[in-house]
Image: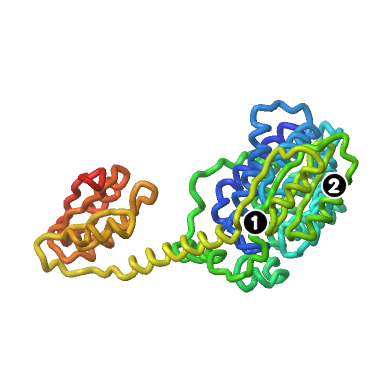
Amino acid sequence: MINGETLKQAIISGANNISSIKARINDLNIFPVPDGDTGTNMSMTITAAADALKDAEPADVSEVAKMTASAMLRGARGNSGVITSLLFRGISKGLEGKAEASGADLIHALGLGVEAAYNAVTKPTEGTILTVARMGYEAGLEALDHEEDPAVLWEIVCDASVEALDLTPTMLPVLKKAGVVDAGGKGILTIFEGMLSVLRDGVVVEQKEEEYETTEAEDDFFRSAAAEFDQVINFTYCTEFIVGRNAECEKEPNDLRLYLETIGDSIVMVADDEIIKVHVHTETPGDALQHGLEYGQLLTVKIENMKEQHRKAKEENEKAKEKVEKKAELTVAEPTEEYGFVAVAAGEGLCNLFNELGCQNVVSGGQSMNPSTEDIYAAVMATPAKCIYVLPNNKNIIMAAQQTAAIVEDRTVIIVPTRTIPQ
């Protein structure tokens, strides 16, 4: 049986797990539009629940599930975040009134979550987070015939979700074209796996500041997948808002949904007795907000330009490509001259300035982008001098430069511990 404390820790573990790889999930973001924010949105949505639970001492699973659903609904961001909140809202309904949850309780609650998510999406699309959650639930439901342990059942849900995620490119041509799995599906699987760590092993996944390790080739692939994808973005503005419902308003929330269908797509809407949460992609966000005001007061509003997000992603991808290409161009040079200089600088203007001042090689980097020892080493080895002076120009880069000096064997490397460009 699962008690309130166990479910609480499972939610926190799921939040930590996705927070640790949200950037990687962002890089998978192709559908419904390649705006590169799915990982961030899902992470922020479940983290809202984790934050609400951290200092709480819930008495039972019903209370934990209710707190989780409430915090996630209000903190939900983006299409994927709202759908994630709906999954947990359904779970909350399934666990209502229960002090502890059996394996069967957990699976049936997940089923209510899947149903709620499908019902909230105007045009459910397979090959997405919906498919991954549904196939996970269906596997868990089938396993109830021979299994009752909650941890074992949740592991079955996770295993089936992995298989479903692998199938998403076969269901959505846009994913197959880009060569990626669905970002939302990856996100919900990551949350489920974080929860499994607690249910099965009693271990809360720790939140990591850095992404899991990958090869440079993998980084390049994931970074460019969304940026290079050429899907047309039909509507410019991702519009989200929460309306605090006016008790005197007699209009049905479904009327708002019907109106939104006339001005946009990717509509996800959920309502309870207190609020209406709306997500829509549209060209006229003001109209969406104006119609929302007919139901009460606007509590929160978020509008993002998806075309601009995609443009920035493409721009960053091009810069990353240029950096890789420039690094590839560096070849080992014979030390034919007596002295040479390598500097670290950020921006094309400063790099050109150092070149004009006599630096044979300039490593791109600075306060927000520290170059690695390998980057500095490559620049040193590409400098045709017997004695090379390295100017780190930032206190955080001095150590990497010093490590370079320690591994260069066929020439002398002197680190000038400059902390700023003016020095």
Q: Is residue 34 above or below residue 101?
A: below
143 with respect to 12 (left or right): right
- What residue is disc 2 on? 253
Answer with left or right where residue 306 lies relative to residue 290. Answer: left
Residue with the mark numbered 1: 237
First reached walking from the N terminus: tag 2 or tag 1: 1
- What residue sits 73% from the left and 59% below the top? 266
Disc 2 secondary structure class: helix
Of 400 and 128, the residue lying toward us: 128
Relative to the observer, which residue lies in front, 178 or 335?
178
* Callout 1 amino acid: Tyr
Category of crowding for the residue at label 1, using alpha-carbon neighbours closer than 10 angstroms: few (below 14), some (14–19), many (at least 20): many
Which percent across, then down, holds residue 330? 28, 68
- 395 relative to 233 in the view: left or right: left
Between 16 and 144, which is closer to the camera in this rendering?
Answer: 16
Residue at the far right in the pictured view? 250
The percent position of residue 364, horizontal first and vertical second, equals 32, 57
Residue at the limit of the structure toward the left, as seen here: 338
Circle 1: element type: strand
Name the residue type under label 2: Pro
